[in-house]
Amino acid sequence: MNRSICVLPGDGIGPEVVSQSLKVLNAVADRFGHRFEYEEALIGGAAIDLTGDPLPQTTLDLCRKSDAVFLGAVGGPKWDQGNGPRPEAGLLGIRKELGLFANLRPVILHPQLSGGCPLKSERVAGGVDLLIVRELTGDVYFGEPAGRGCEQGLRTAFNNMIYREDEIERIARLAFKLAGERKGRVCSVDKANVLEVSRLWREVVIEVAADYPEVELSHLYIDNAAMQLILRPGEFDVILTGNLFGDILSDEAAVVSGSIGMLPSASLGEEHALYEPIHGSAPDIAGRDLANPMAAILSAAMLLRHSFGLEREARAVEQAVSAVLAAGFRTGDIMEPGMRRLSCSQTGELICRKINEQD
């Protein structure tokens, strides 16, 4: 298989974790007889510094012609001051321009990292393996009109929460399909007791559920869902929700895994897909070879699975990550007494070695 990947290293630790992920993809290519071609482009703060634009047109053009897009991270305090362009606009922009309507965020508590989970052991005794399916191109982030003004002499700001039924149906069908490949349960999260938008959300999700009788559907209000995610995370399979609620829940769920440095993500559209770790740019450790690259490497596994259809290769990467953890190796964010500490680059090299050692 020959495939092209647009690489967006971005800001902070982005270039470091991306570098290790490409090492792993190359190890997969060598092991299984594929060829992956990479071409880099600018996004976020790095793009602002060189072009003044967090999402240059050249970047979009390269993303559109590539078979997949791999992103490191965007943002940092350097660009937080003043009224200039923000790096995060590049991330929101690429989602909109590429039509990336679905964000998949698997949350898995590896048994080797259970000691790092902040929840009581009885809360996660049965393990945690859930998938958050978040709608990504609607809701308050993109609803129009939006802006700031002045009413009665007071500064006023407004954002519109808007969903069309086709947007809800599209993300719901993906969630039910994925649930059918997992444990067969979808929990739809909304605020239908208060919001008209959520009432439409629930109506459409129920209509879609009729086409998937093998999948069990339940509903939770967002406030209760946030509580249950901490009280009983192991009882969730697929959580389906909108852009705003999904943003909150997926970041909350991140702590269950023991470290935000362990969580990958995929953003899928009808024609394009983008993969990125969720940990952000971590500017305090950038350039010091301290970052945990496992979230980025697991994002590369999602790329292999969802964009290239290479399930065996994706599992090889995931098994290599598990093997490294089982052997007692840790980066600083997941370090425990008695474990052996690795740098970012050492972690990538060891995962590559584990891939090559597999039967």
Image (cartoon, rainbow, N blue to C red):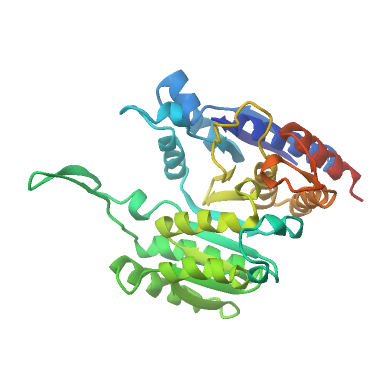
* Residue 291 placement (x, y as % from top left): 66, 36
Residue 234 lies, with reference to residue 40, above or below; the image says below
Q: Quadrant of residue 13?
A: top right
The image shows residue 185 at horizontal and vertical percentages of 59, 74
The quadrant in which residue 285 appears is top right
Is residue 72 visible in the rendered structure shown here? yes
Looking at the picture, tell me which residue is in the foreground, 67 or 313. 313
Give whichever of 151, 182 is nearer the camera: 151
Residue at the image point whose x is 58% and y is 49% from the top: 266
Closer to the camera in the image, 121 or 49 = 121
How many marks on residues?
0
The residue at the far left in this view is 152
Task: Judge left or right: residue 48 versus residue 180.
Answer: left
Frontmost residue, 274 versus 12: 12
Answer with left or right where residue 326 lies relative to residue 122: right
Q: What percent of the width, then of the height, locates residue 257?
A: 64, 56
Residue occupying the far front of the picture = 337
Please say whether residue 56 is visible from this viewpoint.
no
For residue 130, side relative to residue 59 (left or right): right
Q: Residue furthest top?
A: 50
Residue at 55% x, 27% y is: 41
Q: Give the x, y percent position of residue 318.
A: 75, 51
Q: On the rendered image, what quadrant is the N terminus found in?
A: top right
